[in-house]
Amino acid sequence: MSNCIYLDNEFYTIKIHSSGAELNSVYSKKIKREILWQADSTIWARHAPVLFPIVGKLKENRYKYDNVWHELTQHGLARDLQFQITSSDKKSALFTLTSNQHTKKSFPFDFILEIMYELNQEKISCRYKVINPSTNELLFSIGAHPGFFCPLDENEKWTDYAIVFDQKESTQRLCLEEGLLNGNSLPYLDNENTIPLTHDLFNDDALVFKNLNSQSLNLKSPNHCLNFSWNNMPYLGIWSKKGNHQFICIEPWQGVADSKHSLGSLTKKEGIIQLKQNEEFNCNFEFSILH
């Protein structure tokens, strides 16, 4: 059974479910609005899922490790499992997921996944820690998938907003085909830092970038600005459902979807992290509503 944890300070009230250790509500007292997408099942039935132990989709929803094929659905298993609430107070909460017989049916590794949410004045931070408690290697990817209302105000429209990176970028967009990388990339941005939100922006699925110069961005309109930053997550996805103009997901990842040309080997999968015994991996993101 899912339990909820509430965090609160002078700027936000936050609700987190133990199911998936998923943010379910971020109410901004500054603008007096809910800023986190509220999982409308007719559009996109998630709020901010944790992507583990894979990011994105596997070719044929399966992978091979140690000469054995395993099935794993898009974005992995953590988002649908109950986490233990390890500790909590009004400003922070720690959630833990540990491998067990159930997880090993589709992911045959020992792991400890810790997710820490913290309120630090006007910033909301989320830290991921993955620990390998085994004498065997641990192979995984991890990522975030928070959705935010856009526009943030009923008097605004989608096209009032833009994504503005903290640095100018000349980069490539990694192209997706039915959820898989198709091996192509297209030039995207030319010494620029701004992506206007147009009605056709996501007609060809998510914008996926690798190794941007930027480590933060603003989702901004003339009236509102959401600042979002990330660390140790070299891929960035930006997505909304095609034809939808109500929310946008900002998704830093350590990992990426399979190529449609993949042969299925987990050890050769792009973005896979390899942890030896007692090693740990850390990454994080944070966001805030700016004046």
Image (tube, rainbow, N blue to C red):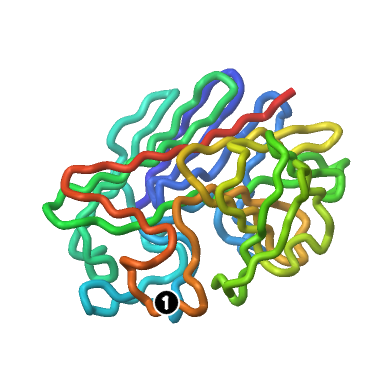
On screen, residue 120 above or below 171: above
Q: In what quadrant of the picture does the C terminus appear?
A: top right
On screen, residue 200 above or below 120: below
Picture quadrant where residue 192 is located: top right
Which residue is at the front of the view, 281 or 170?
Answer: 170
User: Does residue 151 appear in the picture of this structure?
Assistant: no
Q: Is residue 218 left or right of residue 266?
A: right
Q: Is residue 229 left or right of residue 65?
A: right
From the top left corner, tell me how far across and down residue 145 is, in percent. Answer: 54, 51
User: Does residue 82 appear in the picture of this structure?
Assistant: yes
Residue at 76% over, 51% down: 189
Mark 1, secondary structure of its residue:
helix
Residue at 42% over, 77% down: 61
On screen, residue 125 above or below 74: above
Which residue is at the front of the view, 264 or 213?
Answer: 213
Picture quadrant where residue 77 is located: bottom left
Which residue is at the front of the view, 81 or 141?
Answer: 141
Which residue ends up furthest to the left in the rendered image? 135
Q: Indicate the amino acid at tag 1.
A: Asn
On screen, residue 11 above or below 107: above
Near mark 1 (Cα within 10 A), the count class, few <14, some 14-19 or many ≥20, is some
Question: How many badges with numbers are in the image?
Answer: 1
Residue at 65% over, 46% down: 148
Which residue is at the front of the view, 74 or 25?
Answer: 74
From the top left corner, tell me how far across and down residue 146 is, in percent. Answer: 57, 48
- Residue at numbered disc 1: 61
From the top left corner, tell me how far across and down residue 50 is, in percent. Answer: 45, 51
From the top left corner, tell me how far across and down residue 107 is, in percent. Answer: 27, 66
Q: Is residue 9 left or right of residue 62?
A: right
